[in-house]
Amino acid sequence: MAATRNKGEEAEVTGQVMSIFFQNPTNFFKIMLLHVDHISVPWTESEIVVTGTFGTVKEDDTLTCIGHLVNHPKYGRQFAADRYEQETPTSKSGLIAYLSDKQFKGIGPKTAERIVDRLGLDAITKIIKDPRSLAGVGLTQKVQDGFVATLKQTYGMERVMLQLNTWGIPSNLASMIYQRYQEETLTKLEEDPYRLVTDVTGVGFRRADEIAQSLQVLATDPRRLRSAISAAFNRLNNDEGAIYTQAPVLLHTAVNVLAQGVLHPTPPMAVLSDVLKDMVRERTVISEDGRLYLATYYEAEWQIASGLKKLHEADIDADWSQKKVHAAVTTVAKKLQVTYDESQVEALTTALTRPVFLLTGGPGTGKTTVIRGLIDAYADLHDVSLDPGDYTDTPFPIQLAAPTGRAAKRMSELTGLPAGTIHRLLGLTGRDPGELFKEPGPISAQLVIIDEMSMVDMFLFRQLIRAITPGIQLVLVGDKDQLPSVGPGQVFADLLASGSLPASYLTKIHRQAAGSSIVQMAHAINDGIIPPDLFNNQADRSFFAVSADQVPAVVGQVVARARDKGFSPLDIQVLAPMYRGPAGVTHLNDVLQEVLNPAAPDNPKEIVVGTTHYRIGDKVLQLVNDPEHNVFNGEIGRVTALTPAKQDTDHRDRLTVAFDETEVTYGRGDFNSITRAYCTTIHKAQGSEFPLVILPVVHEYGRMLERNLLYTAITRAEKLLIMVGEESAVTQAIHRPGARRATTLPQRLQTQFKTVPAQRAAQSAPDVNEAVAAELPEPPLTYQMILQHRIDPMIGMTGITPQDFLNATEDKEG
Ligand SMILES: Nc1ncnc2c1ncn2[C@@H]1O[C@H](COP(=O)(O)OP(=O)(O)OP(=O)(O)O)[C@@H](O)[C@H]1O
């Protein structure tokens, strides 16, 4: 259980470090015992335990810690320091004692005294500034080098941590910042405090603004305005999945970002748009026909288009006669006992003979059946073995991958071959956003098949394309009508929309067995048709009409009934589009946990994370990729063991989750990697299917009620679907096709595939720089054009102030 904080103002304690019980070398967290010289709150003992993030602190150092008294459930009252100040030795004897500390090898009290005699009380600053000031002290070069290095390291870090503390940065964040920039920290931040937003995870614009305030940066400083514009881009890229935006929208969003900062007043729009123009001129922002892109996004679209063109035009080892290909398809159909329909046959033959191929279709149209046939026919034509045992020294020639662990597992189950996540295929950890911007290593394969392509975002897809050497065949499979990726872009839909690559659309529904009414309904909804029996109960689906406030109770009852009928919690999946609200994921999880895994005398142990109580047996969802532990975003498991800190010898909370193939133990620092999973978002359920899906649909979900969301949700149901909620909310969703994301990948592909003659392009596809140059006029011209008429960000905005934007937003949202 976490320590509880005593309410009230900050407290301060000054004292000498008597002992350091614990220190974590990676994040500087320490637990120490201090002899109390002075304390600002009532305290009767002569010692106090202090916890927090500290730089190089050692026994006998004197510290002033600022923070709060807390009540630790097991260890009682202790002091949690948010920041601290360390007394530097100011007396001659103090300085000699400091310099003769054992951390400085080869410096004893005599030498230390000589140093202080020669250099005075500011000896440390002098030595750090210029090590040659030690000349004449009589140190050997080796001792001197070691001494200066240690001094720089310890004293330098100390200085940095103290300075960051005085800028109001809590110690744990200060240590992350120090780890990023090391001894250059202060210079870097003084140069531009806003670089933290991009460089250090967890620092947002507001925090950077606070530091900037300490550095006396002005509200109109261009560094600040640039950062706000970049943050506005990121917001639009992440919230709307957009690749580009228009100047008024961008500036509007940037004004909102600025308003959330601490520096005031918000600068005039003209100043902000001037900064945007500068960014365009310098090409950190690219302008094209009134669209604005962050350069990295613009480049990624071009790289995908040119990369695909290279793959599409490469020679592949598929010079078969039509007859031979048909024979292979016939053989495989016999073997798998399927009569492939016409589009399936076309899909198979194209996939076997073309370098890049796209396959899309709704549920039950036979995508998986085609993949299975493709693998067998490919193996037959190329005479390769499909027994993984035959590839102990060489890589398996067919690589199957999907964006989530669950989808990959399903792929493997349905094909009987190894399949993994795209992250694993590319050697990505999923934890470092920077890895998507490094050149990936090549994939070893002859044929790569990717399933659930609609979930793949632009940057992941670019890495995939970069990692596939021309000559490898690539087959991309998915349902283009499902929700687009969580990350920016809508790659799969765009690839199909471009018409540039060979593609097959499977439309015939083959899942005809009794109880296929879910699939039929899904197809109708996808076409924007309200099935006449939508709200009538069928063998495999039903609808409970209830008001929004009844949803949690009714969902709870339905789940209890399903459990009583023998469904395991892992087979029942409740889905909702958003976390907040009475019918949102968080509240439904509270309700469902009470139904399926309540606190009980025989299950008393709990770990509390925020407002969530975890117990043994809880169903949980992994939220991030963690290849190190072989567990991936979207996987569901159950808590099998749990040790609250007060019962643990190391005093740490620990929680173990069993997933299908692995068991992972989480410490408190990892708890944000999981969440309860009785109910999950529809986005997180993409790529997975469940025997029983329970789907609340209410107007409370607001703008999220769109056709592709409903379609994606109901297609998660393998056998049974129970919808609960408001009929009018369901029909509203069917009538609202999701908005197209702002992307230009189709145009890039069309440019790449149509304007450059095929033969020439195969030898040298233009690289992205050429492509960018071809699209953009030379810089002076661009700037002139922007200034004159092309994309004046102020178009139509004369006389409008930033405040008008804010009011407009409030009105819209209110
Ligand atoms: N040509 C066919 N003839 C008979 N049955 C078929 C044919 N194609 C597919 N099927 C059957 O239809 C069902 C659905 O096929 P499959 O699982 O391949 O579709 P899918 O598009 O991958 O569906 P989903 O996206 O829902 O997983 C399966 O039971 C499969 O055996």
Image: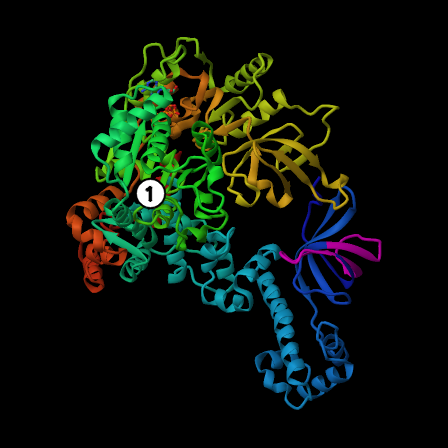
**Looking at the image, which residue is at 40% across and 61% down?**
223
157 horizontally vs 765: left or right: right
Residue 471, image x, y percentages:
30, 47
Asked if residue 722 shows in the view, the reply is no
Q: Position of residue 259 (x, y in %)?
A: 42, 50
- Residue 327 quadrant: top left
For the magenta stretch, what is the residue range? 22-50
* Quadrant, the C terminus: top left
- Please, which residue is most extreme toward the right here? 45
The residue depicted at 57 percent of the width and 82 percent of the height is 130
Query: Which corner quadrant holds the N terminus?
Result: top right
Q: Is residue 100 above or below residue 53?
A: below
The correct choice, above or below, for 341 with respect to 448 in the image is: above
Q: Quadrant of ligand 1?
A: top left
**Quadrant of residue 237 in the image?**
top left
Look at the picture and state if 550 lies above or below 386.
above
Residue at image location 31% in from the left, 55% down from the top: 285
Q: Is residue 621 left or right of residue 440?
A: right
The residue singled out by tag 1 in the image is 242
